[in-house]
Amino acid sequence: MMETTATRATPFERRDGVLLVGGIPADRLAERVGRTPFFAYDRALIDQRVGEVRAALPAGIELSYAVKANPMPALLQHMAGLVDGFDVASAGELGEALNTTTPPHRVSFAGPGKSTAELRQAVAAGVTVELESGNELVRLREVGELLGIRARVALRVNPDFSVRGSAMQLGGGPQQFGIDAERVPAVLAELAAADMDFQGFHVFAGSQNLDAESICEAQRATVRLVAGLAEAAPGPVRYLNLGGGFGIPYTSRDRPLALGRIGENLAELLETQVRGLLPQARVVIELGRYLVGEAGVYLTRVVDRKESRGRTYLVVDGGLHHQLAASGNFGQVIRRNYPVALACRDDAGEGETVDVVGCLCTPLDLLADKVRLPPAGIGDLVAVFCAGAYGLTASPTAFLGHPPPAEVLV
Ligand SMILES: Cc1ncc(COP(=O)(O)O)c(C=O)c1O
């Protein structure tokens, strides 16, 4: 009789103590991949998460996937069938998004420092360029004139508020992101004088937020702000991107986001504010990490086990060069362990306290600090969870010259 149990703090299941990814036992998957370390993303878990978000959001809200969270081409192809659009942050991401079935008018391009070459690609593609500055408007206008194409344009606004609870603040106060709200009317006036296809506004003010109430508050404040700015717009607002910032629990201290509360708030906002104030606006929520973060796992093999003055180290063949975030060096203020387990033995039962360290010559390469695991030896597979977002492409892969990891979507 096979036993299936949920692994603590992760949505992955086990069968007979062995971690399953996409229904495949992790050790067999490692054979299939042919090498370790590798990232594995579970299609069914992504589907489930998108389904939960769709169920919570009111009808009529569009869901956009922020490609920066995980741009793996196969995953993007999969996402194209699940979401309404893509948010891209570079010409590279733009190219990958355009390789999917998502139509260009459902792709938005945000990010500071877009080069003129990138603006040309975006205008030629027909995606919505989200302006981050007045200078960007000047360059976009020139590009549109040069190509003889009316650029689709929205303004990314740096709001006059910040979002409480966001681990990463991208709005409020001085910012390299977006146009300060008080400067927006002047930029809109310039835009009105140019021959451009004005779409609307985008406010993305924070990321990795587990406090539903503060997200709701930010969404209400965004609608108020945009309704005011719309008065100076050269045409009706047809696009209102409310951002996202939905966080996921990485550590045992984190509580999952109350998604239902956000859905209720959005339903009320749509009903009482947006439909009346901005009747032509399609309303977009833009999520990266929340859709894919918990659906990924980084699998790495123990290559050495050593004792040093009372501590036990499991040295694995991966490390921060692939999964920087788990080492605590990607924006974290205080380092806390990501969920870690042995892939082929259950967490239950007798364990030992170990440090899981990577194969790089730096003490920063720490994947788990004093973690309880079943006794492990050379050859065992270690699973580092929450690896679906800001994993491989947010890591310094060239550091120390090790080969890149494989990635599979299962
Ligand atoms: C403009 C924009 N959109 C979307 C995201 C995705 O954020 P998250 O992955 O936390 O949902 C970010 C993250 O920095 C962003 O800057």
Image (cartoon, rainbow, N blue to C red):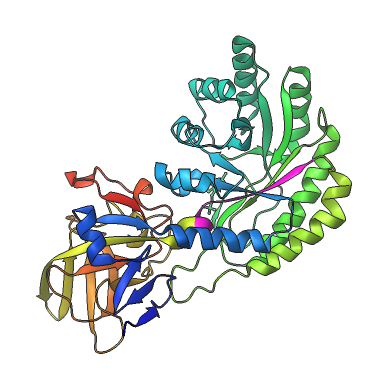
Left or right position of 232 against 398: right
- Residue lying at 83% horizontally and 43% vertically, measured from the top left: 278
Query: What x and y, as percent, mark residue 250?
Result: 44, 67
Residue 73 appears in which quarter of the rendering?
top left
Query: Residues in magenta?
Result: 281-291
Q: Residue 45: x and y, percent?
A: 47, 62
Q: Position of residue 398 (x, y in %)?
A: 24, 42
Q: Which quadrant of the figure contains the N terminus?
A: bottom left
- Does the magenta portion include 282? yes
Q: Residue furthest front?
A: 1
- Left or right, 265 with respect to 88, comes to right
Measuring 52% from the left and 52% from the top, which residue is drawn there?
A: 288
Query: Which residue is found at the position 73% from the left and 36% from the top?
Result: 200
Residue 207: which quarter of the image?
bottom right
In the picture, the quarter occupied by the C terminus is bottom left
Whether residue 109 is in magenta: the answer is no
Residue 92 is situated, as x and y percent measured from the top left of the image, at: 43, 32
Q: Nearer the viewer, residue 156 or 296?
A: 296
Q: Between 98 and 332, which is closer to the camera in this rendering? A: 98
Q: Nearer the viewer, residue 231 or 70?
A: 70
Can you tell which quarter of the image residue 351 is in? bottom left
In this view, 124 is above or below 202 = above
Residue lying furthest bottom in this view? 350
Find the residue positioned furthest to the right.
276
